[in-house]
Image (cartoon, rainbow, N blue to C red):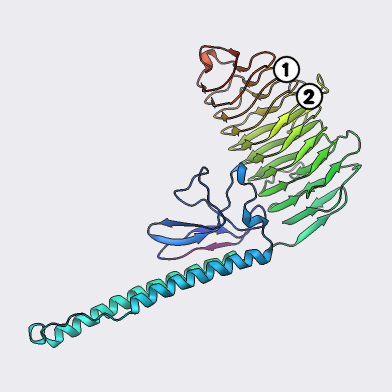
Amino acid sequence: MRKFTLAGRGLVHPCYAIGPFGGPSCLQPPGFSIGDSPTLSTPWQSGGSRMVVVWYDPRPASLCPLWFQMAAPSQSLVITVLTVLTVLTGLISIVALMKPNHDSVGSEGARGRETLQARHRKKENTRMKYINRDLAFVTGILIALAGTAVPALAVTSITTCGFVISAPGNYVLNANLLNCTGDGIDVLASNVSVNLNGYIINAGSPSSFIGVNVGIPASPIRLNHVGIQGSGLIKNFVAGVNITRCDYCQVALVTSAQNANGMSADHVNYINVGSNVLVANTGAGLLLSESVNGVVAYNEISGNGSSCPGSTSLPGGGTSLVVCGQGLFIEDSSANTVNNNTLSGNLANGLWQDHESQFSRIYSNVTDGNAGVGILIDGSGGNGIFNNTSSRGNGTFDLQDTNFACGTNTWGSNVFFTSNPSTCIH
């Protein structure tokens, strides 16, 4: 990816020209956190320097910011407006600096002609210093904004099953892919956006293939910045969506139903699964394996496990009887956030995190009416489980921690009826 810099008053800020949905994507500015709410263009200050950046917001509620929804002419218009505003600001500053100063001269005999000339030379030098500085600042901003005006990637239409994506770009489904006899779509490249555009990907009858498969099979090569965006329905595959060895990848607004697994992800960093519907799958809703710093938020993951007991395919290969019927199964993972999901009515547990996972933040979820446990923390430590709004009517316990006295986990402000152990789950 092409790098450019926003340079002004000694400031250098690294950005990337191509973002996950085809727009610019900047590194997170100092002083901002994921909880902040930057919009299309966010002014911010660092060390007294002003600048304008377009920053991609990774939160699940903002998976596709306004910038990425704009057509290329609209993006160009925004860049033009920002450029004009920057030029006007710089010119106003320069005009103000160049305005003559009419100092009170006072008595020439008291000061002396040489003293007055020296003072005027000093003021003129100072004025030129500020003018040059602001000219450099405006020039730097213009160069930076010119760097962001990357032509939009061409949109490629997808109309047939078995479509292979091997180059960066924007891809849009423009027809239903019905009765697929292999994978629906295979993504083998980074910097890819796939828009399902309201269509259906269907295997016709239950198959061993995948609806949308992201990752290079049998390869250690990692992909990055791949976005799968709905709306769209995927059904009758072994997995509706499968993502393997991918960093900063996202799935949003996808309905995955009547598959063996709704969605699976393996060996992923910073994955974002948001606002999807993963329901009525015969095995599990979402399988997350070896995930670091992922976010699972605002999903409906309910009513899964209709064919249990039975074997369920795992993201890393092989099958397992125990994960069948899980709403969300987290395996061998670290520092993930699970919030604002509904995980109800699954044939096993609503959420099960295994003993090899740790440091998760699990909050504001609804886990009602599962046949097993609403939220099960199975031997893992360092987790925070708090403010889950409802975990009631589950078959075994509403909340369960298999560690002695909950180990290093913290449970607080959850709404539930039954728990084990009751002394440390609150």
Tell me where the magenta segment starts and ends, as one range.
Answer: 3-8
Q: Tell me where residue 100 sits by quadrant.
A: bottom left
How far apart, in angstroms, are the residues tagged by discs 2 and 1? 10 Å
Q: Which mark sits nearer the N-terminus, 2 or 1?
A: 2
Q: Tell me where residue 315 sits by quadrant.
A: top right
Evaluate whether residue 183 shows in this view.
no
165 displayed left or right of 351: right
Q: Which residue is mark 1?
A: 371
The residue located at (61%, 18%) in the rendering is 399
Q: Tell me where residue 70 sits by quadrant.
A: bottom right
* Element at label 1: loop
280 displayed left or right of 390: right
CB contact under 8 Å: marks 2 and 1: yes
Q: Position of residue 22 (x, y in %)?
A: 67, 57
Looking at numbered disc 2 in the image, what kind of residue is underneath it? Gly
* Residue 403, placed above or below residue 34: above
Q: Which residue is mark 2?
A: 305
